Amino acid sequence: MGDIRGTTTRFQGQDRLVDWITKVRVKKRSLTRHRKENLRVDAILTSALMKAETLLRMKQQQRFQRWQRLKTEVCKADCTNVCSATSNERVSNQWDEKTCEEINSLDRFMCLLNEVKTPVQR
């Protein structure tokens, strides 16, 4: 695996870190299968693995927090846009009296049509 010390600080992407953690776990498992265990190597691998997993958890939490902030900002922006669009529609969609009278008369006519009942022939 090369020099283990300091490698966890060089990782920038989570994918590379996850791959590295997987490789260290495989290496650690292969060492424990041998009858002649080297405790020093096992301790170094364990320490590096713990640091890498802690770093990965920290990066995942930061990513999650950034995502939550982004969702909040998008929701606020959407609400602001909807509110301003609704108020603009109210101003622009105000009907004049003539249009309201025509709509009301059409509504009354439709109500009268609903009152007329014709027998259904089958």
Image: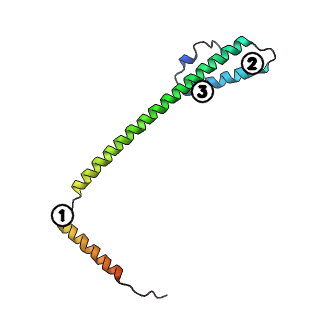
Towards the viewer: 97 or 1: 97
Q: Are marks 1 and 2 in contact (CB under 8 Å)?
A: no
Question: Label 3 amino acid?
Answer: Val
> Residue at left 59%, top 24%?
53
Q: Secondary structure at mark 3?
A: helix
Between the C-alphas of marks 2 and 3, the distance is 20 Å
> Residue at left 21%, top 67%?
99
Q: Secondary structure at mark 2?
A: helix
Judged from this view, the residue extending furthest toward the right is 35
Question: Label 1 amino acid?
Answer: Asp
Up the image or down, 82 lies above or below 12; here it is below
Q: Which residue is mark 2?
A: 31
Towards the viewer: 85 or 57: 57
Up the image or down, 48 lies above or below 118; here it is above
| Image position of 51 (left or right of 90) | right
Q: Which residue is mark 3?
A: 18
Instruction: Residue 34: give x, y in percent of width and height.
Output: 79, 18
Instruction: Residue 101: give x, y in percent of width and height.
Output: 21, 70
Instruction: Residue 100: give x, y in percent of width and height.
Output: 22, 67
Q: Which mark sits nearer the N-terminus, 2 or 3?
A: 3
Q: Are marks 2 and 3 in contact (CB under 8 Å)?
A: no
Label count reads: 3
> Residue at left 25%, top 70%?
103
Q: Which residue is mark 1?
A: 96
Between the C-alphas of marks 3 and 1, the distance is 65 Å
> Residue at left 32%, top 77%?
111
Q: Which mark sits nearer the N-terminus, 3 or 1?
A: 3
